[in-house]
Image (cartoon, rainbow, N blue to C red):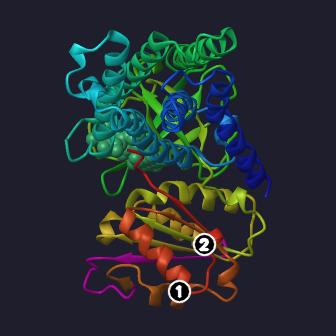
Amino acid sequence: MKHLVFGGIWLGFYLAIVLAPVAALLLVPTPQGGGFWWDVSMGLGFAALTMMAVQFVLTARFKRATAPFGVDVIYAFHRYLAYALLVIVLIHPLILILRDPSLLPAITAPWTVSFEISAGTVSLALLLVLVAASAFRKQLRIPYGTWRFTHLILSLGAVAFAFMHMFGISYYTDPPLIRGLWWLIGISILAIVVFVRFLRPLAMHRKPYQVTEVRPERADSWTVVVDPEGHDGFDFEPGQFAWLSVDRSPLLMSEHPFSIASAPGQGGRVEFVIKELGDFTNTIGQVEPGTRAYVDGPYGSFSVDRHPEAPGYGFMAGGIGIAPLISMIRTLDERGDRRPLVLFTGHSTWDRVPLREELDELEERMNLKVVHVLEKPPEDWEGESGWITREMLDRHLPEGRREFHYFICGPIPMIRAMEEFLGELGVRGTNIHTELFDMV
Ligand SMILES: Cc1cc2nc3c(=O)[nH]c(=O)nc-3n(C[C@H](O)[C@H](O)[C@H](O)COP(=O)(O)OP(=O)(O)OC[C@H]3O[C@@H](n4cnc5c(N)ncnc54)[C@H](O)[C@@H]3O)c2cc1C
């Protein structure tokens, strides 16, 4: 409930910020030859520029601001807002051109119009590239690191040209109050970028970690243990995640997100279970103990601690999706929690079930049932096989399951299927929580 209230307050705050510059337009009379559609177009332009500014705040990973939702939800919000923003930016000149077709060259031949008009066109073009590169990054095969760096440059460019467009035309920004407001917005964007890209990474330098253990797990995965060096680390809720960089300065934008797999309260020690999947993760197994690391966290809202009142919990892991779930199960074990827990894991073969010995031990000790579902089971396998189905959930989830809270982490098709099956078993959507290991 507290989180919903916070969420409502933040949403109201967002709308107030986006609409404030539109309201400020009312202070300035419409120029001769303007009219209703002119005002609409200007209002959209100003709203779009404020939305651009807020996009920087959304992705700045301010812990207090993201806590009510979880940073993954914020990133999704950022993505959808970007689409809305692009539509608004496109409508802004479209209205003007429909009113007065002689303005078309501003888009078709921007080099023939004044600088302040062409600056708007450049901003629009940068925004188009920015959104297209993000929406189709995987299809375009843009490596994540390259995308991330160009995303920053393109977004700064789009905002800079939008400001030149607005200040160049200057009609609506002449009154000192409005001009001051826009300067404040512009300086805030720069301050956020400086804070996120330089000051926060510099602060992380003062709180380094050391890799103390790297041990192999099944299915090309590794448990990586890091301990804080000369500080207490941070508190976290089981199931949350952190950004990890190993042997590289946090200034280099080289951090990757990983769920924390360990339980909290171990003197700042944090464990990750990392699967080999690409440039960074393929090298994780060769990291030597003693290597310097940096951990920025905690983030996310995928945690049993956000739903402590549940009479029991169901967990569903696809592959390495076990990582945040094992953190929650280990934590409940340490707390001596006796509520019923059921864990479903989906893997291709028996050899590729990470942490399965530990899961056996936990099953002995706790009120926990583990159901391994194997795509290709061995001949003598007596357990479940194939994909996790509705019937399997029905078979293994105990009485009272409708009131349980469920935590699902795995590939999208699996998450969607589990949501559907749980819905069919009468579980409310508010009791189902998901984590996707894929932000962009
Ligand atoms: C919230 C969250 C929790 C995660 N937890 C785990 C975990 O516990 N264990 C685990 O093995 N994996 C986890 N992942 C996935 C992990 O972040 C990626 O597998 C890893 O970053 C891949 O990097 P790479 O350089 O090896 O591969 P690449 O080939 O460079 O990247 C593969 C894909 O991973 C994603 N990715 C890469 N770098 C980043 C980055 N810096 N930020 C965001 N996404 C990135 C991109 O979608 C990319 O296409 C998690 C991801 C998220 C978003």
Please identify the quarter of the rendering in which residue 310 is found.
bottom right
Residue under the point 51% across and 14% down? 198
In this rendering, is residue 431 above or below 85? below
Dividing the image into four equal quarters, which quarter contains ligand 1? top left
Number of the label disc, if any, that sits on residue 50: none
Place of residue 81 in the rendered image (x, y in percent of width and height, measured from the top left): 49, 43
Q: Is residue 375 magenta?
A: yes
Of the residues shown, which amino acid type is indicated by label 1?
Glu
In this rendering, is residue 41 above or below 168? below
> Is there any visible trace of residue 102 in the rendered image?
yes
Q: Nearer the viewer, residue 185 or 377?
A: 185
Residue at the far front in the pictured view = 33
Q: Is residue 190 left or right of residue 430?
A: left
> Is there any visible trace of residue 234 in the rendered image?
no
Mark earlier in primary sequence (2, 1)? 1
Please identify the quarter of the rendering in which residue 232 is found.
top right
Q: Nearer the viewer, residue 32 or 209?
A: 32
Residue under the point 36% across and 68% down? 413
Residue under the point 49% across and 48% down? 76
Of the residues shown, which amino acid type is indicated by label 2?
Gly
In this rendering, is residue 242 above or below 172? below
What's the magenta region? Answer: 366-383
Q: CA distance from mark 2 to mark 1?
A: 11 Å
Residue tagged 1: 424
Label 2 residue SS: helix
* Tag 2 and tag 1, C-beta contact below 8 Å: no
If the image is split into quadrants, where does the C terminus sit? top left
Label 1 residue SS: helix
Residue tagged 2: 429
If the image is split into quadrants, where does the N terminus sit? bottom right
Place of residue 273 in the rendered image (x, y in percent of width and height, measured from the top left): 45, 48
Q: Residues within 10 Å of mark 2 (few under 14, many from 20)?
A: few
